[in-house]
Amino acid sequence: MPEPGLGATFIDLLRDWMLWADWFAIRYLVVFSIGYAALLLLSIPELWNHWRMASDEHLQRLLGSEAVPPISLLVPAHNEEVTIRDSLLSFLTIEYPNLEVVVVNDGSTDRTMQVMVDQFELYQVPPAFSVSVPSKPVKAYYRSRLHSRLLVLDKENGGKADALNAAMNAARHPFVVSVDADTIIEPDALLRLARPFLLYPNIAAVGGTIRVVNSCTVEYGRVTDARVPTTWLVGCQVVEYLRAFLFGRMGWNALGGNLIISGAFGLFRKEYLKAIGGYLTGNVTEDMELTVRLHRYLREKKIPAQLPFIPDPVAWTEVPATTDVLARQRERWQRGLIATLWKHRDMMFNRRYGIIGMLTYPWFIFAEALAPIVELLGWFVLVVGLAIGAIDLEFAYLFLGVGLGFMVLMSIWALILEEVSFKRYRKPGDFWRLLGFCVLEGVGYRQLTLWYRVVAYWNAFRGTETWGRMTRQGIGRPAAGASEV
């Protein structure tokens, strides 16, 4: 039998450990909440400056100008039969003077290729370029009888990164935009995205804003009526996207340390992409890995080029409408984040890489990669500690106030920034619906995605490399299909 008092001693030790763990979690949340608040403050003047430029009445004059850089739009497509027609219509009718659209059918098993053949009257042509970045074999090349801008590649399945490499090989122009096949680009978005290359001499890449197309009215490849979804899962993602783009990336803009250019909408100098070997296959978040590798290349070659984010070029994308699909997407995002940060871990606090190595990279390690583990620890300790009386209610309120209240406040501020700047949602009811989702995101949705991100650690440890599949509702119509997340 255990000695008298042994159980009591164990409980006392457990209480002491839980008290320490809870204080650690609260301090962690406080420190990084202050960091997010700093990003918010930094984003306000950045957003103001970009908003003033976005209203430039002379923007349309660029349409007839030879100064705008020629752009090739790279569109990887895998099992996108539901969305491919509307997406390609939006790409082909973009207001841009010198544009080609390169679509890669990456071994689709549905009717993606047939839909393109039927809708755009494709006919086979011989290749007219050299291969500079390796990719899986391309079976055939097609041109359209209806749209001279369109080039379609039909290749063996190799994943999104491999498809982008094949598209980059076929691209004629020195600037390329990577865009997802389920994305709708606003008519003047490329003009806005290209503007930094005209205003500043040292730009390597530019990222634009991604917004949620679910519940919006789409006609002929255009969002004609932007609406906020009524379902909580999609509505919370609208708030999440607003916060991430309107002050997260805008804040890093002010510091010159953007570490992500979204794979759904980013403009690059092709020469730099080829210099670093194109997109890395086998990585489930190829956009972040490419951006980090590009930062490395520019610093190591002492090229003073920047990778800014600008908020007014907008692309719309469909987000997961079910928890199953959301789980696969967020697990993959977190697993890709872990893999990318681990691969480039020598950048950590490395002065050679400037602001990226000394501030941005450590932030992504401690505030993004480790956040799910610390937050889960906080929740575990809170629940168990309350159950055994090791933590009082004052502690619990402090944890909840910092962990939940602050992020709700940040979401509301992002909503305010949206309302006073670009205001894409114009109906009064949309504002109040978004305000409600700001609260729901912090209570329920956040804990859901927290669990998905924790699962990513286990899958990363096991060496999982799958993408998962995403069921599409279909842009502007209720059909269903399947695609990579």
Image: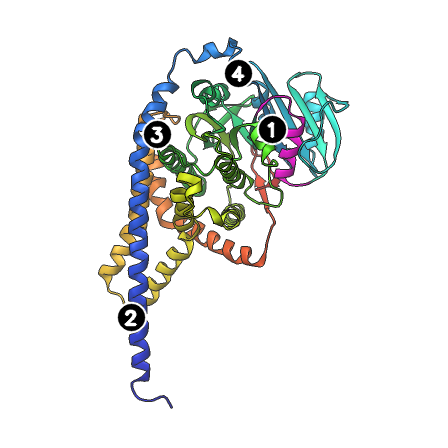
Q: Where does residue 224 sit, x and y in percent of width and height?
A: 47, 22
Determine whether, in the image, residue 408 is placed left or right of residue 285. Answer: left
Q: Nearer the viewer, mark 4 or mark 1?
A: 1
Q: Residue furthest bottom?
A: 1
Residue annotated with mark 4 = 95
3D distance between C-alphas at marks 2 and 4: 64 Å
- The boundaries of the magenta stretch are 158-175
Instruction: Determine whether 59 is above or below 152 in the image.
Output: above
Determine whether, in the image, residue 484 is placed left or right of residue 251. Answer: right
Q: Earlier in the sequence, mark 4 or mark 3?
A: 4
Residue annotated with mark 1 = 74
Res 251 → quadrant? top left
Q: Nearer the viewer, mark 3 or mark 1?
A: 1
Q: Earlier in the sequence, mark 3 or mark 2?
A: 2
Residue annotated with mark 2 = 16
Disc 2 on helix, strand or loop?
A: helix
Disc 3 on helix, strand or loop?
A: helix
Q: Earlier in the sequence, mark 2 or mark 4?
A: 2
3D distance between C-alphas at marks 3 and 1: 29 Å
Q: Where does residue 446 sit, x and y in percent of width and height?
A: 40, 48
Label number found at residue 418: 3
Q: Where does residue 35 sit, x and y in percent of width and height?
A: 31, 44
